[in-house]
Structure formats: C-alpha cells, structure tokens
C-alpha cells in the first residue's frame, strides 16, 4: 500500500524522523485486525520522496482476512499527532478477498 502525505497547501510533507502507525479494523465489528508501524512493515521513502511511505502486507498478515476493513495511518512526532490535511490514500476502506488456489 503506497501512501503520500501533503500539507494544507498541497505541498509534500516530509516524514523523515516521524513515526507512522497504520491499522485495519473490521468494518462491521470495528475490531483491529492488522497493525503496522515504522520499522515493522512501514518504510518511509528517501529524499526527494520522503513524503511517501509504504505499508508492506505479507500473505501471512492477510490470510485470515476477507471483506471490507477500515484503514488509517496516524503520523506522530514523538507523543504528538502531526496534523496534516491530505493523507492521500492512507485512510479509507481496503477489501481483502479470499484466495482460491486451483490444483492443476
């Protein structure tokens, strides 16, 4: 999952040195099903793309997930949440589908 962060003026917001926490919650029951954070599944890109981050989802992370999940990223500077206006696609709904393997 690739995400970009921009400030209130639409300019890229540098994420270097900040912490990012990402989670996916079951849309129906609101239970957290999956979490990632900087250094453990989240990678902040290098300059000049340091306003972008990737959330890496491995098959083991999602093998039991099927359906719609609300997801969001929270960006922190130490203990404070950084307020940014546009988080691109770092929040919304993500849909997981069951994978069916057909034997040949």
Image: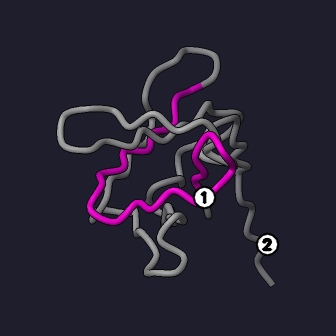
What residue does disc 2 label? Answer: 102
The outermost residue toward the bottom is 104
Do the residues bearing badges 1 and 2 touch, measured as CB atoms within 8 Å?
no
Residue 59 in view of the camera: no
Q: Disc 2 on helix, strand or loop?
A: loop
* First-in-chain label (1 vs 2): 1
Which residue appears at 52% of the width and 38% of the height?
84
Name the side, left or right, on which 51 lies relative to 1: left
Q: How many numbered callouts?
A: 2
Name the side, left or right, on which 47 lies relative to 99: left
Q: Disc 1 on helix, strand or loop?
A: strand
Residue neighbourhood size for the residue with mark 1, other residues' Cα within 10 Å, grouped as few (<14), some (14–19), many (≥20): some
Q: Does the magenta stretch include residue 94?
A: no
Q: In this view, does 67 lie above or below 38?
A: above
Query: What residue range appears in magenta?
Result: 4-26
How far apart are the alpha carbons under marks 1 and 2? 33 Å
What residue does disc 1 label? Answer: 3
The outermost residue toward the top is 29
Residue neighbourhood size for the residue with mark 2, other residues' Cα within 10 Å, grouped as few (<14), some (14–19), many (≥20): few
Image x and y of residue 36, in percent:
37, 51
Q: Is residue 7 above or below residue 53?
A: above
Quadrant for the C terminus, please. Answer: bottom right
Name the side, left or right, on which 73 lies relative to 68: left
Q: Main secondary structure of the magenta part?
A: loop
Figure quadrant of residue 35: top left
Q: In this view, does 6 lie above or below 71?
A: below
Quadrant for the N terminus, please. Answer: bottom right
Figure quadrant of residue 67: top right
Q: In this view, does 13 lie above or below 27?
A: below
Observer-side mark, 1 or 2, equals 1
Image x and y of residue 17, in percent:
26, 62
Front position in the image: 99 or 5: 5
């Amino acid at each position: 999952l690739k995400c970009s962060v921009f400030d209130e003026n639409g300019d890229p917001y540098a994420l270097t040195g900040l912490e990012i926490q990402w989670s996916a919650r079951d849309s129906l029951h609101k239970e957290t099903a999956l979490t990632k954070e900087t250094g453990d599944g989240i990678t902040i890109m290098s300059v000049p793309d340091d306003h972008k981050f990737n959330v890496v989802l491995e098959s083991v992370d999602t093998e039991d997930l099927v359906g719609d999940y609300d997801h969001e990223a929270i960006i922190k500077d130490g203990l404070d949440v950084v307020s940014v206006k546009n988080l691109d696609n770092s929040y919304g709904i993500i849909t997981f589908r069951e994978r069916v393997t057909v034997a040949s």
